[in-house]
Image: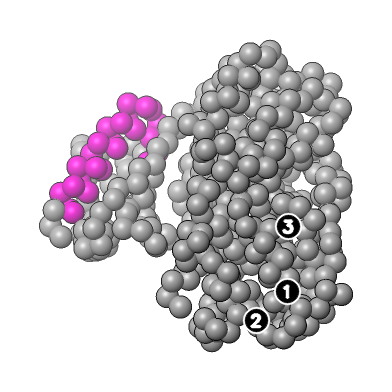
Amino acid sequence: MSEIKFGTDGWRDYMYDRFNLPNVQRVVNAIASYTKDNHGAERGLVIGYDARFFSDFFAKKAAEVLTAQGIRVFLSKRDYPTPLTAFAVTHYQAFGAIMFTASHNPPEYNGVKFIPEYAGPASLEITKAIEGNLIKHSEADTASGEPVPQLVTAIDPTEAYLKLLRKLIDVDTVKKAGLNLVIDPMYATGRGFLTALFKDCSVREIHNRRDPLFGGAMPDPQKDYLGELIALVQSKSNSIGLATDGDADRFGIVDSDGTYINPNQVISLLLWHLITNRGLKGIAARSVATTHMIDRLGDLYGVEAVETPVGFKYIGEMMRTRPVIIGGEESGGLSIQGHLPEKDGILACALMAELRAVTGKPLLATLKDLYTKVGEFYSNRLDIHLSESAKATVLELCKVSPPEMIGTVKVNEVRTLDGFKFILANGSWFLIRPSGTEPLIRIYFEANSNEDLQVLTTDVRQLLEQWSKTA
């Protein structure tokens, strides 16, 4: 039972090892119990899956487990993105969804998560209820009764989802701008969606076949994995590169000269775009690890920036109760006002194409214009591997003996919303946050110049080395 651990968004693990059919059936049974306990059997559950090995197999087995217990099932006709599966929950008025995906993780992983009826990440309360049910199911208790095929409906909500996106995206402006869109779904579930949305525009889609090995790399739209996309964008004028991850809930953006625009920059650009070009009003939600450029832009335009713990479920929860213009995370997830409370990489890519078309100039030029208004921001993240004892020591020292100085700069504030965030007198900050499943510490940094960022990174690493030696 202890082998199944839910993280910030479901359970992920190695296939053929802990992520196997008996364990998957136990998780599905736990979700089935939660569904029946909350009178959701008749409304039913959507089952979605990504392009990984055995994801379709696990989805079909999940349908058998659910229908055997009298729960209606809406089964995806092909591998679909997480945001499309979340949309299907509202479209079919289902009780929730089970999504088989390991997102941007390497091919040897798979995962499963539950998406409740509000079409966003499961809250802590829902996750705890499912985990409680999981404890009740032994390894032998993997199914109950005979499957009922009549309770399964095959679904394809693609057109309805694209119709929603067309309400949120000014496709005509992108077409009139003559943009060359180069799209990379990374052999994964995002195949064809941006191409269909921009069908009347100049589009070239690469890596647009299903490959469970993702071309031999991680389906993670970061600069290191987008070499071919960058080269193609550089070869075309008036271009933009758009990439989505393994389940298309995260994004990667490449400017016309091949410059990778990181998620912190994308969220900042889109906040500005939605305020100034769309006239949206409300608040901006960002995770504790995401750029403070959001705050500076908020100060400039009279928009409150609200900090949340890491995990899009916190942003999604805020989107359900407050008028959030944009909610985003530095890890590459965002959603906007009028959309689902779930991160959507397809939406993010489409919005960046719209922004590029509206401004009529490269993304980097627009970003530099914003820097003149609110200052420059440079960010970085490090994963420091430590023994469990050293990890515990570092966290304890953060709590009982936080540093008053980092190098020659004073620490003005320590925030403990999620991990330990140190705000420095020069405007820089760093966040120390433990991994919940690995013996490592994640450190996020931000400074107002590249030089300050390098100095801050070096000083913090030296501090952690000193602390870990006391373990």
Amino acid beneath label 3: Thr
The stretch of residues the image draws in magenta is 445-468
What amino acid does circle 2 point to? Ala
Name the mark nearer the viewer: 1 or 3: 1
| Side of 157 where 113 appears, left or right | left
Say if mark 2 contacts mark 3, CB within 8 Å: no
SS at mark 2 in the image: loop
Residue sitting at x 87%, y 75% = 150
Residue 364 image position (x, y, % from top left) = 57, 22
Q: Which callout, 1 or 2, points at the residue further toward the start of the chain?
A: 1
Residue sitting at 60 percent across and 80 percent down? Answer: 142
Precedes in sequence: disc 1 or disc 3:
1
Q: Say which label, 2 or 3, has the lower sequence index.
A: 3
Write down the residue under mark 3: 85
Residue 300 can be seen, yes or no:
no
425 is higher (above) or lower (below) than 393: above
Magenta stretch contains residue 36:
no
Say which amino acid is labelled 1.
Answer: Glu
The image quadrant where one finds the C terminus is bottom left
Q: Which mark is residue 64?
A: 1
Q: CA distance from mark 1 to mark 2?
A: 8 Å
Residue 143 - label: 2
Q: CA distance from mark 2 to mark 3?
A: 24 Å
